[in-house]
Amino acid sequence: MSKAWIQAKHPEFVRDLFKFFCQACDQLEKQFVRFDEDGTVEFDVVKDLVGSEMNKGLLWRMKDTAHHVFRNDPHAQLGGQFLDWALGYIFHETLKLKEDAYQKQNYAPWFHRLYEGDLNASEKDVTEQLFQVLNQTEESMRREIDRIRFIIAKCRQLLPYYLRRYSDNVLLARYIFSQNELVRAVFASEYAGLVFAIYGHEPERMYILASQSLRLGGWVDEAAQAVDEAIKQNPASKMVLQEKKIIDNWANRVHT
């Protein structure tokens, strides 16, 4: 991929980066909660999140997209460099978690069966010593999960300030609107700060941009929903009223 092509696609890469981050946070946290409850993660889920060179998983695509966004940014910021490193770190730490999950899922039961089986004293002693090493796997998983959670929390703080330059990115606005339940779940108490960092004192702009993108794609009903949300934010805004008029005209044309 040429640098010129990557820069031309920059708005899409920014949207994709945010999308991948939200999806990754959601899926990883489900596994982390499972580990909190019973000390296990689902190996197949973690394996799919990582993927392979020939079939890249969500975290791999997030890492690669981060490189496209931050390493080809003509207005590079230190925060962007931090994010590039941090999102790559999440991938590599999850790779280690995947390997530990494999050991715990496949070999811990085997060692249990061996130890409880018919072994002589010497064999039992060796089994116990080796099993002690395997038991440390769970401790490693705990540390890996804690580190990933910490880095994700820092990314939630850094991303809004990086994205403030993209307040006109219609694809980003459309994603935040269309996947609002997921975005709110990921950012939780930091959601309001995310919207403010990007759109300042005009949160209705997110909904206007989303509406514009949706109606141009032919999604008139969804665009109307975005306009309704914009009206709730600022019913007196000229931009909001103008977009509502356009949507109403489109809707009348569609239904006549």
Image (spheres, rainbow, N blue to C red):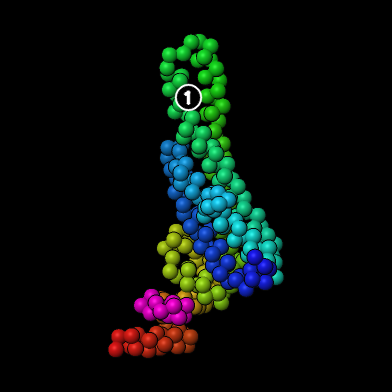
**In the picture provided, is 101 more to the left or to the right than 72?**
left
Whether residue 231 is visible to the viewer of this picture, yes or no, is yes
How many numbered circles are shown?
1
Q: Quadrant of the N terminus?
A: bottom right
In this rendered view, identify the residue nearer to me: 232 or 52.
52
Residue 52 at what x, y percent from top left? 55, 49
Magenta residue span: 212-223
**In the picture provided, is 256 more to the left or to the right than 170?**
left
User: Mark 1 sits on what residue?
Assistant: 111
**In the picture provided, is 150 more to the left or to the right than 215?**
right
Q: Quadrant of the C terminus?
A: bottom left
- Which residue of the protein is positioned furthest toward the top in this rendering? 121
Say what amino acid the circle numbered 1 marks. Phe
- Which residue of the protein is positioned furthest toward the front in this rendering? 54
Q: Is residue 190 magenta?
A: no
Overall secondary structure of the magenta stretch? helix
In this rendered view, identify the residue nearer to me: 144 or 92.
92
10 Å crowding of disc 1: few (<14), some (14-19), many (20+): some
Q: Is residue 219 magenta?
A: yes
Q: Is residue 59 above or below residue 17?
A: above
Image point (62%, 50%), residue name? 89
Assign a secondary structure to mark 1. helix
Image point (50%, 10%), residue name? 121
**In the picture provided, is 17 more to the left or to the right than 81?**
left
- Which residue of the protein is positioned furthest toward the left in this rendering? 256
